Amino acid sequence: MLSPDSPLHTITPQAFTAEAFAPYGEAMSLDATPRLPINFYSGKNAVHGPIRVDSDTPPEFLVFRVGQRGDNLRYLERHVEMTQTMIPLNGQSYVAVVSPPDVPLENGFPVLDEVKAFIIPGDVSINLYRGTWHEPPFPSVDGQLFLITSHERLTRGLQCKLDENGELNELDVEKRSPFYRTGQRVRVRLP
């Protein structure tokens, strides 16, 4: 049972750079993504990209309103049938907690020293590689909006209920509870 006396592991977010984020996914922004040589857009117009959504089945988009939920990491999840893109819609920064797809697991959970957090600027979208462990973004404002990619199995899996341990392994959603798996509370030191 999770209690204030449980051991505590704290993750301090680092500043975002596309290079530091590369083990987890791609960044899309004016700084991180190349400008395409499309010359019929002139003046202040510019096209940067591309970032590719990779999915075994047709991708779909979801609008995700994220409420503030404190600083505890409730679980890490991953999806292996697609990349997942998170596009902030309000321009506010957010914190992304991630661990690489090939991270060593301890009792079925990513080794805690390999779980990282990044402060993502509000004009940067991230495209997580298949299998990247992550938690939904920690918003900087209550009700922050994101456009995220999904697919039919992933969307249906997100509608399933967590088990008694706070976990889920349905369709393309694998959620693991840090407390159940490690016996530790995991806290993210939010800005």
Image: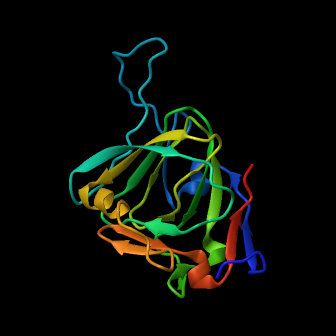
Assign the N terminus to one quadrant of the image: bottom right
Residue sitting farthest toward the right = 5
Residue sitting farthest toward the left = 57
Colouring: rainbow
On the image, the x and y values in percent for residue 120 come to 61, 46
On the image, the x and y values in percent for residue 138 come to 60, 51
Residue sitting farthest toward the bottom = 107
Q: Give the total of numbered labels.
A: 0
On the image, the x and y values in percent for residue 185 come to 68, 74
Residue 32 seen anywhere in this rendered image of the structure: no
For residue 57, above or below residue 1: above
Q: Nearer the viewer, residue 191 or 130?
A: 191
Is residue 115 rendered to the left or right of residue 188?
left
For residue 189, above or below residue 34: below
Residue pictured at 41% horizontal, 67% vertical: 131
Residue pictured at 64% horizontal, 54% vertical: 118
For residue 90, above or below residue 93: above
Q: Nearer the viewer, residue 2 or 73?
A: 2
Q: Nearer the viewer, residue 28 or 171?
A: 171
Residue pictured at 48% horizontal, 79% vertical: 164
On the image, the x and y values in percent for residue 16 come to 64, 49
Residue 29 seen anywhere in this rendered image of the structure: yes
Determine the image quadrant of residue 90: top right
